[in-house]
Each structure stands twice: as C-alpha cells, then as structure tokens.
C-alpha cells in the first residue's frame, strides 16, 4: 500500500476523531513507527480540525451562561493572604488568590488522628518504662555475676 493512498484514505481523520476500529488503530500506530512523516500529517490534520471547530462553532445564548453562573456560585478573590472565615460547619482558607474549602468533618478526623498518634506514643513510652523496671527487677533477683548452677549427673 502506498503511503499517499493510506493518508488519503481518511485514516488520520478517523484516528483523531476516535472513529477508527481497534485493528485500524493498531495498524496506524505501526505505520507511524515505520513512516515518521505521518507525525507531521497528524499535526497538520489536528490543526485543520481545530480551526474547523473554532470557525463552525456557535456561541450559546446569554441565558445559558447566566444559568451556569448562578449554579457555580462564584466567590470573590481574596484581598488578604492567609485569612480564615467560618461559614456554618465549613472553614474557608484563602491565600494568594486561591481558595480551599475544608469541611468540619475533615478537621475532626485530623484531630482524632492526632489524638490516636499521641496515645500510641504515650503507650509506647509507658511500656518501655515497664520493661526497664522489669529488667532491673530481674537483674536484682538473678544477678549476672553468679555462676549458673551445673546440672546434677547421677
């Protein structure tokens, strides 16, 4: 098959629009590896399809944009950095024109996680102290300087 005939068959358009079958896609990928000039043709066709979409596009009516804007609930950009506001059960942290909304439940989960970590650290310290006390007690009962008793052989 000639490369020009392959390009003119419309495979590039089908590939870019997602209309090619699985076999066609596999074959096209192989052809791209064999013929690098196909990459230039792909770039050209992408540009043509983009221009076609922009030129043929129809702007939606203003009513549609108004309805969308009402549903989005735009927030004003912050004027100060690192300010905190409380709205109901949600905290809004604003810093340098960025807004992050944190639910009160996430905040409670974070506090609970911190409490659990502190409890684990405290219990580790407590059990280490108990282990040290037990070790000292055993060393007092069984000093290491005493020779171990020999088994009695009859």
Image: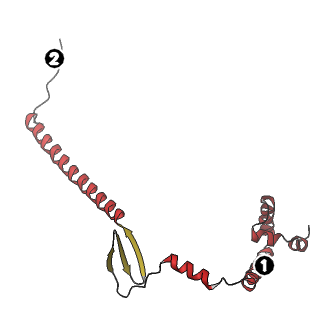
11 to 41, vertically: above or below: above
Residue 111: percent from the left, percent from the top?
29, 61
**Disc count in the image?**
2
Question: Mark 1 packing: few (<14 Cα in 10 Å), some, or many (20+)?
Answer: some
The residue furthest left is: 140
Quarter of the image for the C terminus: give it: top left
Residue 90: percent from the left, percent from the top?
35, 70
To which residue does mark 1 refer? Answer: 45
Q: Looking at the image, is mark 1 or mark 2 earlier in the sequence? A: 1
Taking the image as shown, residue 54 lies to the left or right of residue 87, namely right
Give the SS element for disc 1.
helix
Quarter of the image for the N terminus: give it: bottom right
The residue furthest top is: 154
Residue 118: percent from the left, percent from the top?
24, 57
To which residue does mark 2 refer? Answer: 152
Which one is in front, 146 or 141? Answer: 141
* In front: label 1 or label 2: 1
Give the quarter of the image for residue 65.
Answer: bottom right
The residue furthest front is: 63
For the point 47% across and 78% down, the residue is 73
């Amino acid at each position: 098959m000639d490369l020009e005939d392959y390009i003119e068959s419309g495979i590039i358009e089908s590939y870019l629009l997602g209309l090619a079958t699985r076999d066609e896609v596999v074959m096209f990928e192989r052809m791209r590896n064999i013929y690098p000039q196909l990459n230039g043709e792909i770039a050209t066709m992408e540009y043509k399809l983009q221009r076609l979409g922009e030129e043929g596009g129809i702007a939606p009516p203003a009513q549609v944009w108004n309805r969308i804007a009402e549903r989005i609930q735009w927030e004003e950009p912050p004027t100060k950095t690192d300010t905190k506001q409380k709205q109901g059960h949600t905290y809004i942290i604003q810093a340098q024109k960025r807004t992050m909304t944190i639910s009160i439940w996430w905040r409670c989960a974070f506090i609970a996680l911190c409490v659990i970590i502190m409890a684990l650290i405290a219990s580790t310290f407590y059990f280490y102290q108990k282990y040290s006390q037990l070790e000292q007690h055993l060393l007092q009962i069984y000093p290491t300087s005493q020779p171990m008793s020999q088994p009695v052989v009859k």
